[in-house]
Amino acid sequence: MSTLEEVFEETYGSPPTLLVRAPGRVNLIGEHIDYNGLPVFPMALQHEVRLALRPRDDETVRLHSNDQRFPPIHFEIEPAIEPWKKGSWGNYAKAPAQELAERFGIWQGFDGVLESDIPVAAGLSSSSAIVNAVGLALAHISEVSTEPRSLAAVMADAERYVGTQGGGMDQAISLGARDRCAAKITFHPLRLRHVVVPDDWCFIVADSGDVAEKSGALQAAYNLRRKECDEALRVMTAHLATEKITAQLCMSYPDLCGTIDAETLIKISEQVLQGSLLRRFRHAVTEAARVDEAVDRMLAADVHGFGALMDASHASLKTDYHVSTAALDELVAVAKEGGAAGARLTGAGFGGCVVVLASRWTVGEVLETLVTEYFERRHQAERLEERLFVAVPCRGASIREI
Ligand code: NG1
């Protein structure tokens, strides 16, 4: 098989001058709360997007993918780039171009060839890795700051171009991660606290096989949850102000969670909110508390404590947030049967992957159980290395001259 550089030369007739890499991520805990400004705890993966490129002297971006499913694209950089139809992969390249053009007036394009080994539509952020890789390339060419946190904030806004009202977790971890570490990410302002993953902890990623393509119906379901969280916050803050429960007006989830403890907040919400608003709010508040606790459990190398928090997170995502599926629930149950310390769906849900925590001493047994009790039973044992692997915490995106 040809290397990325060889494909570039065959495609464009001269060698590339820059090489970018941007990893996917697995979120350990803190699901569906980044868009509420609440903390999350992901780590970057060994699977990544790689982009070989050569800057051009004009506004054109030409991009080939090594993956036959993604046809070649080209477009001109300008502040208002018309998106292609929903679900087109090229929109993930247009997104950073348009954001950087609008904010910083960049115009210089490139010829590029891209390859990725991040499973697509599996909740491992394959899309943000493309946004980040193209964004890093364009920012570098035009001498816009590529400092991870400032670029991550720009890329989080950029990706909303595709229609998903996401938070900033994926862009931040893919750009800012450190080797061997997970990172607790807090927002407004964006900060990453790097925590070394204990050597004897193994995070397994297992793909349910249900595609979680976040365009169309799933995008609407995702955006609806964000709206429900906003509405629940509005009702709660109005109540707290009227009842004079808080001295000052809590305008955001971090304000609220920083002012009143989770248990009290849940008690109040059970009197003030109903139905799905109550459930979404309860998930957000309890999940934020689990993130703080999980960081402490990792620092204390308490594998069972961390695992219990993952189990509680999955239960909350299933019953209060309604983003799990039968296949994800089954994978979680099988992993637990095999001796996992904890297991939960990871990413947006509605399909995709689970993340499973096992110790070095139990990981073999857990993997074996997942193979026999899930993948073989469902006749999904082909190309298993892409669907079941132990995640290696890797450093964030980089760019280098070649
Ligand atoms: P994935 O799993 O990549 O679809 C999405 C959002 C995140 C976060 C998670 C749920 C984007 C780019 N990503 O991730 O910000 O909200 O869902 O925790 O929208």
Image: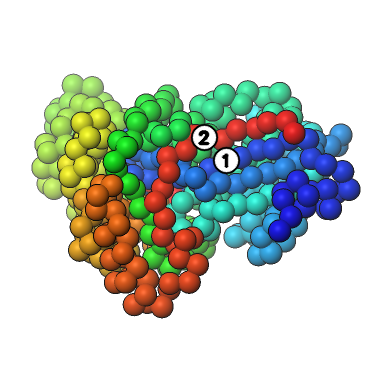
Extreme residue toward the right, this view = 13
Count the marks.
2
Kind of residue sitting beneath label 2: Gly
Quadrant of the image containing the N terminus? bottom right
Crowding near the residue tagged with mark 1, few <14, some 14–19, many ≥20 C-alpha atoms within 10 Å:
many
Q: Residue at x 83, y 42 (%)?
A: 15
- Residue at which label 1 appears: 22
Distance from mark 1 CB to nearest ligand 1 atom below 8 Å: no
Position of residue 359 measured from the top left corner of the image (x, y, whole percent) = 25, 47
Tell me if the residue at label 2 has its CB under 8 Å from ligand 1: no
* Label number found at residue 117: none
Residue 290 lies in quadrant? top left
Q: Which of disc 1 and disc 2 is earlier in sequence?
A: 1
User: Identity of the amino acid at label 1?
Assistant: Ala
Q: Residues within 10 Å of mark 2 (few under 14, many from 20)?
A: many
Rounded to the nearest whole Å, what is the CA distance between mark 2 and mark 1?
Answer: 6 Å
Q: Is residue 168 above or below residue 13?
A: above
Q: In the rendered view, would you say 362 is above or below 351?
A: above
Q: Position of residue 343 (x, y in %)?
A: 27, 54
- Taking the image as shown, residue 61 lies to the left or right of residue 134, namely right
- Nearer to me, 101 or 206: 206
Q: Looking at the picture, how far across and down is residue 161, in whole percent?
A: 59, 46
Residue annotated with mark 2: 396
Q: Residue at x 24, y 53 (%)?
A: 362
User: Marks 2 and 1: CB-CB under 8 Å?
Assistant: yes
Identify the residue at horizontal 65%, vertical 64% (top origin): 69
57 horizontally vs 103: left or right: right
Q: Nearer the viewer, residue 13 or 198?
A: 198
Q: Position of residue 234 (x, y in %)?
A: 30, 40
